[in-house]
Amino acid sequence: MNLLASFERLLLRSRRLLALGSNLALLAIMTGVSADTLLRYFANRPVAGMLEGVELLLVFAVFAGLAQTQADGGHITIEAFTERLHSRSRAFVRALTATLAVVLLAAMTWATGAYAWRSWQMGEYSAGLIAFPIYPSRFVVAFGCCFLCLQLLQTLLESLRRLLERGDSGA
C-alpha cells in the first residue's frame, strides 16, 4: 500500500470529522443564541453563561473547519498572476506558497499547542457567570492549525509531484 495514499485517506477522514464538529458547533451556537433571545425577550429569563459558551464554541466552529476549507479551495486566492502561467510554473508557485504556509502553520501549531498545554496545566477557566474551561478551545486552535498544516503538506506534495512530471501540458 502506498504511504502517501494512506496519509491522504487518513487526512480526508480526519478533516471531514473536524468539519462535522465545526458544523455542529455552528448549529449549537445558532440554537443557543436563538433560545437565549427568545427567553430574554418573551420570558425575561436569559440563558446564563450563553455569551461565554458561544465564545468557546465559535473557536471550535472556525478552527476545526480550516483544513476542510483548504481542501475545498475555499480560502482566498489571487489568480491574476498564476492563471497565465504554464502548468509547471503554476505548480512551482503553488509548491513555494505551500512550503511557506507549512512553515508558518508548523510554528503556529507549536506555539498554540504549548499555550494550550500551559492553560490545561493551570486549569484556566473563563471569568463569567459560569466558569467554562478555556483549555479545550485552546487545544482546538492547536489541532486546527495542525490539520491545516497537514493539508498544506498534502498540497505541497501534490504540487511537487506535478512539478516533477515529464512534459508541460500548457496553460
Image (cartoon, rainbow, N blue to C red):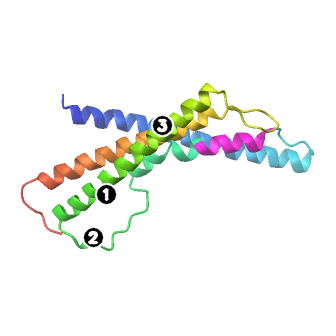
- Which comes before the other along the chain, label 1 or label 3? 1
Nearest the eye: 42 or 66: 66
Q: Which mark is residue 97?
A: 1
Viewed as shown, does residue 99 lie left or right of 119?
Answer: left
Viewed as shown, does residue 70 lie left or right of 133?
Answer: left
Tag 3 residue = 143
Q: Which of the image's four quarters has the C terminus?
A: bottom left
Residue 23 sits inside the magenta stretch:
no
Residue at image coords 38%, 55% = 73
Residue at image coords 39%, 49% = 104
Nearest the eye: 127 or 39: 127
Viewed as shown, does residue 167 lie left or right of 47?
Answer: left
- Which comes before the other along the chain, label 3 or label 2? 2
Residue at image coords 41%, 40% = 147
* Dot 3: element: helix
State which region is magenta.
49-59
Q: Which mark is residue 29?
A: none
* Residue 168 x %, y %: 10, 62
Viewed as shown, does residue 6 lie left or right of 143?
Answer: left
**Could you tell me if the residues under marks 3 and 2 are in contact, i.e. CB atoms within 8 Å?**
no
Mark 3 or 2: in front is 3
Q: Is residue 148 above or below residue 87?
A: above
* Dot 1: element: helix
Amino acid type shown at disc 3: Phe
* Dot 2: element: helix
- Which comes before the other along the chain, label 2 or label 1? 2
Amino acid type shown at disc 1: Thr
Q: Which mark is residue 83?
A: 2
* Residue 37 x %, y %: 81, 49
